[in-house]
Amino acid sequence: MYLDDNKHRFPYTMEWLYSNMPSGYCMWHDEENNLDNHPENASLFWPYLPSKDIHLCRTFKIVAKNKGCSNPNHDPSIPIKPQYSYSMNAFLGGDGQGMVSNEYEVRHPAYVFVFSEENSWEVPGLTGSGCGINDNNLRIGIPPDIVDCFATYHNPPGRDINKGSANLVFVDGHVDSIKAEEQKDGGNFKLAWPREKSDIP
């Protein structure tokens, strides 16, 4: 769909959903500025999935209301009313070092994710960016660096939402999940890196 119409080029990951973010990193919970209310802030990708409900996991909606926003620049005047929960792989058309811009540059489409979920909070040992979901840009660090991580709130063992799993959509279109413990020691990076292993900087 989108890739076919755009010469197989990925959208810029910082702007795949919003082309303009008036409330910055608080857009994910800013109901007043969502795209139903302000379609002028939509990106070129929006017409392909033009419903905010498609972009919001029901589980995240519940969990995030309880956990709040961990963004250091959080605006407390904006109520926590989740509007989206998915982010795009920063190595696909984004700002990740070594990123690719075209679908055909992805060496193994069945092993590289395009979209996944983030928490609204930090997970010790998994998150190094200082916050959870913020800009729709899921930036997995090149080991040993830790930046963002996949969500951990689905099917949490013993109700520990730091140890559950996240859903991922891959370049070839299939969907899978990853558990929190599988993200450690570069496990999340393996699902993000689009080039050959020998190309890791």
Image (cartoon, rainbow, N blue to C red):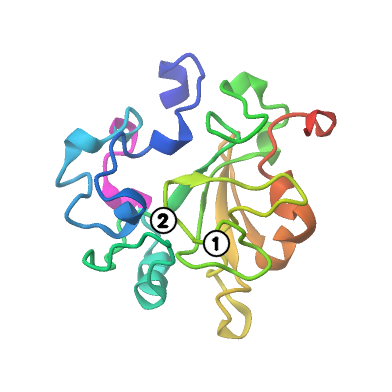
**Which one is nearer the viewer's eye here, 174 or 158?**
158
Q: Earlier in the sequence, mark 2 or mark 1?
A: 2
Residue 9 shown left or right of residue 31 in the figure: right
- Determine the main secondary structure of the stretch shown in magenta: helix
Q: Are marks 2 and 1 in contact (CB under 8 Å)?
A: yes
Q: Which residue is mark 2?
A: 85
Q: Residue at x 78, y 34 (%)?
A: 200
Q: Is residue 159 magenta?
A: no
Percent of width and height locating residue 115: 52, 44
Q: Dot 2: within a 10 Å radius of its alpha carbon, few (fewer than 14), some, or many (20 or more) residues?
A: many
Q: Residues within 10 Å of mark 1 (few under 14, many from 20)?
A: many
Q: Residue furthest bottom?
A: 158
Name the residue that disc number 1 marks: 151
Residue 49 in the magenta stretch? The answer is: yes
Quadrant in which the N terminus appears: top left
Q: Which residues are magenta?
A: 47-55
Rendering quarter of residue 113: top right
Left/right placement of residue 21 relative to residue 127 reads left
The image position of residue 146, as x and y in percent, is 67, 54
